[in-house]
Every structure is written in structure tokens, then in C-alpha cells.
């Protein structure tokens, strides 16, 4: 293996690591949006039910406050659209994992059978694919990134069973 191959493999590791962080960050952001959606829906349902139950008792200031609260929560749900953001982050995370796997296969299997110019083309293609995913994805929240980073650093020694058997610790970052 020559110096160019080593540089290409190093770049593949960088891309793989970047995809791991991006995927995990998107999954963490998706989790935040899902929880927000559930909380808002729960509060919306509770205030709506209380408001409806107050109609039969009497019309009071409490009834007006409950109606306004239910309306505001509904407006917040419509404006923020947390369910759509959840789905977008979840899909982005899945796309980054898919790309990470594609990079790993290139690095572990395909690279040995390719000529130098084919290796350069492939690593450039994979890099552009990662860049496109970054451009087309929603930004990862700071909280999501910090949680993802903590989880990745905690799980750094986690490896596939086959790699444990073969003694290969390079695969899972």
C-alpha cells in the first residue's frame, strides 16, 4: 500500500466518523422533536377536554383561559410542526448511516481492487454525497450534538462481534 492509498483510507475514516456523528446527532434531534410533539399534543388534548367539560358546568373565566390555551397550543403545533422535523431528522440520520456503511465497504473491501484514479473518484463521490446530505438536512441542535458526542465517546470501544473474533478494532467508531 503506497502513500496515496493511506491518504485515501485516512479520508475514508474521516468521512466515516463524520457520518457517525451526523447520524447520531440527527437521531438525538429527532428524539427531541418527538418528545416536544407528544408533550404539546398531550397538553392540547388535556386543555381541550377540560374546556369541553366546563361548557356543561358553566361559562366562566376558567373556560375562557382553557379555550385560549388550547388554541395557543394548537397554533404552536401548527407553526413548529414538530412531527415533520422529527421525520426529517430521522431520515437524515438513516441516510448518514447508509453512507457510513457504504464508506466502510469501500475502505474494507473495494479499495484493494481499484486503481488509484478509481479510488480518488470513489472517495470524492462519497465526500460529495456527505456534503449533499449536510446541505439538505435540518441543522442538528446543540443539545442533540452534545448528547450524540457523549454517546459516541462512551461507545467508542463497541465493535461488531465478527471484529471481536478477528481482532479488528478499526471498524466501529
Image (cartoon, helix red, strand yellow):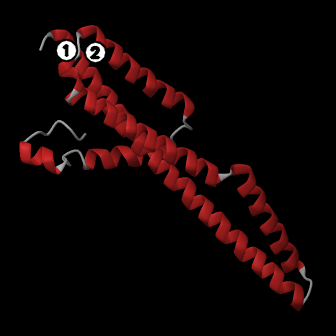
Q: Position of residue 144 (x, y in %)?
A: 46, 47
Left or right: 46 in relation to 119: right
Please identify the residue farthest to the front as the structure is shown.
113
Per the rendering, the mark at residue 119 is 2
Camera-side mark, 2 or 1: 2
- The part of the image, by quadrant, that contains residue 57 is bottom right
* Callout 2 secondary element: helix
Q: Residue at horizontal 72%, vertical 69%? A: 44
- The image quadrant where one finds the C terminus is top left
Viewer-proximal residue among 28 and 166: 166
Q: Position of residue 16 (x, y in %)?
A: 31, 32
Residue density around tag 2, few if under 14, some if 14–19, many if 20 or more, within 10 Å: many
Question: Residue 5 bears which disc, if any?
Answer: 1
Q: Is residue 31 above or below residue 137?
A: below
Kindly indicate whether the residue at mark 1 contacts the one at mark 2 (C-beta within 8 angstroms): yes
Query: Compared with residue 96, is residue 74 higher up or lower down, i.e. above or below?
Result: below
Q: Which mark is residue 65?
A: none
Assign a secondary structure to mark 1: helix
- Residue ID at (55%, 61%): 35
Identity of the residue furthest to the bottom in this view: 57
Image quadrant assignment for residue 36: bottom right
Instruction: Name which quarter of the figure residue 127 lies in.
Output: top left
Along the line of sight, the residue nearer the viewer: 14 or 63 = 14
**Left or right, residue 131 beside residue 112:** right
Q: Is residue 145 visible?
A: no
Q: Quadrant of the N terminus?
A: top left
Q: Viewed as shown, does residue 46 lie left or right of 65?
A: left
Question: Is residue 6 visible in the rendered structure shown here?
Answer: yes
The residue most toward the right is 59
Amino acid at each position: 500500500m503506497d502513500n496515496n492509498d493511506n491518504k485515501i483510507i485516512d479520508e475514508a475514516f474521516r468521512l466515516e466518523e463524520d457520518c457517525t456523528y451526523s447520524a447520531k446527532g440527527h437521531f438525538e434531534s429527532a428524539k427531541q422533536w418527538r418528545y416536544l410533539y407528544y408533550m404539546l399534543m398531550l397538553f392540547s388534548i388535556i386543555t381541550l377536554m377540560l374546556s369541553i367539560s366546563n361548557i356543561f358546568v358553566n361559562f366562566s373565566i376558567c373556560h375562557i383561559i382553557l379555550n385560549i390555551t388550547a388554541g395557543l397550543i394548537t397554533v404552536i403545533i401548527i407553526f413548529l410542526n414538530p412531527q415533520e422535523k422529527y421525520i426529517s431528522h430521522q431520515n437524515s440520520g438513516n441516510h448518514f448511516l447508509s453512507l457510513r456503511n457504504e464508506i466502510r465497504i469501500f475502505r474494507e473491501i473495494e479499495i484493494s481492487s481499484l486503481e488509484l484514479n478509481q479510488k480518488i473518484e470513489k472517495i470524492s463521490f462519497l465526500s460529495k454525497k456527505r456534503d449533499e446530505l449536510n446541505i439538505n438536512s435540518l441543522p442538528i441542535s446543540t443539545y442533540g450534538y452534545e448528547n450524540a458526542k457523549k454517546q459516541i465517546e462512551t461507545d467508542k470501544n463497541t465493535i461488531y462481534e465478527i471484529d471481536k473474533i478477528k481482532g479488528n478494532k478499526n471498524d466501529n467508531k
